[in-house]
Image: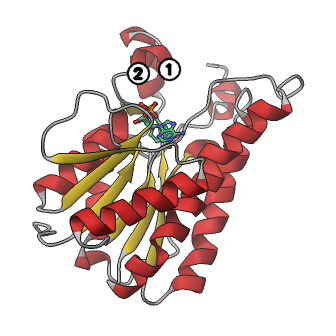
Amino acid sequence: MAVELVGKVALVTGGTRGIGRAIAQKLAAAGAKVVVCGRMPGDLPAEFAFIACDVRDPEAVKAMVAQIVVEQGGLDFVVNNAGGSPPAEAATASARFSERVVALNLLAPLYVAQAAYAQLKARRGAIINIASVSAVRPSPGTSVYAAAKAGLLGLSRSLAHEWGPEIRVNTLILGYIETEATDATYGDAEKQAAIGKNIAAGRLGRAEEVADAVLFLCSSGASYITGAELAVHGGGERPPFLDIVKGEG
Ligand code: NDP
C-alpha cells in the first residue's frame, strides 16, 4: 500500500542525520511537508525546513512548534527521534550527566508532544516515539539511557489514553541500526557482521527500514494502532545461554 501524506506536516526531531534524516526523507517522499530540528543545521536537502532547537529546552520547543504552525499551516505528525547517550559507569556518572540523558531521551519527547498537542488533536494526528532495545533488556554501561527509554514506553502508553482517540501515540523499539555513526558505535565491518550473526534477520537494520515503520504508523493503515510498541530489531538477539548449555559458547 503506497502511503500518501500530501497536505500533512511532520516534525522529525534530530532529523539532520542518522535515523531521523532517513525518516524525514521517507515522509517527504510520501508528500508530507517535513520540518527537522537539531542543535546544528548540518548539510540538509532543500526539501526539509530546518529549525535550530535544543529539544531539552521546553520554551525553545514551544517556540519551534509555534513557528511550524505559522510557516507550514499546522502540524500532523511528531517523530520524537532525537536521542542517544555516551556510555558511562553508573557507579560514577555525575548527576548533571544523568539529568541530561533523561532530559534528552524522556523529557524532550514529552515537551515536544505537549507543545504539539493542540495541533495534533485538532488535526487527528500521531506521535511516534523512538525507543531502543535498551529499554527492554539490560543495558550495562548506559543504564540511565535504558531507564529513560523505558520511561518513554510508559509515557507513550499513557498519552495514548490521555490524548486518544484524536491523537495516536506509538513507540518503535529499535535494535542495532546502521547510520553514519555505525563504526563508532558498533565497531568495524567484522564486528558488525558478528553482531548480525546473532540477530534473527542476520544483520544490522537500516535507517530506511525504521523510516518504513514510521511511515506505516503515520498512515491510515495504522488507524487502530495506538499505545503500541513495534520492535524494529530484526527479531532481536539469540540468548547466549543456549550455546553455553550446548558447550559452544
Ligand atoms: P544520531 O546521533 O546519529 O543523531 C541524533 C540526532 O539528534 C541529530 O540530528 C542530532 O543533531 C539530534 N540531537 C541530539 N541532541 C539533540 C538535542 N538536545 N536537541 C535537538 N536535537 C538533538 O542518532 P541515531 O540516528 O543513531 O539515533 C536516533 C534515535 O534512535 C535516538 O533516539 C536513539 O536513541 C535511537 N536508537 C538508535 C539506535 C542505533 O543503532 N543507531 C539503536 C536504538 C535506538 P545535533 O547534534 O545537531 O543536535
- Kindly tell me whether mark 2's CB lies below 8 Å from ligand 1: yes
Looking at the picture, does residue 166 appear above or below residue 134? below
Secondary structure category for the residue under label 2? loop
Instruction: Give the numbered dot on residue 224.
Output: none
Kindly check if marks 2 and 1 are in contact, taking CB atoms under 8 A apart as contact: yes
Residue under numbered circle 1: 185
Q: Residue 181: give its label.
A: 2
User: Callout 1: helix, strand or loop?
Assistant: helix
User: Is residue 127 among what the camera can see?
Assistant: yes
Instruction: Give me the residue at 46% from left, 59% from top.
Output: 63
Which corner quadrant holds the N terminus? bottom left
Q: Quadrant of the C terminus?
A: top right
> In the image, 125: left or right of 81?
left
Mark 1: C-beta under 8 Å from nearest atom of ligand 1: yes
Judge whether 108 appears above or below 198 on screen. Answer: below
Which residue shows up at 53% across the image and 37% down it? 237
Q: Quadrant of residue 137?
A: top right
Q: Position of residue 38 (x, y in %)?
A: 41, 39
Q: In 3D space, how far apart are the residues under numbered discs 2 and 1 (Cα atoms)?
A: 6 Å
User: Which residue type does callout 1 highlight?
Assistant: Thr
Camera sees residue 206: no
Residue type pointed to by label 2 = Ala
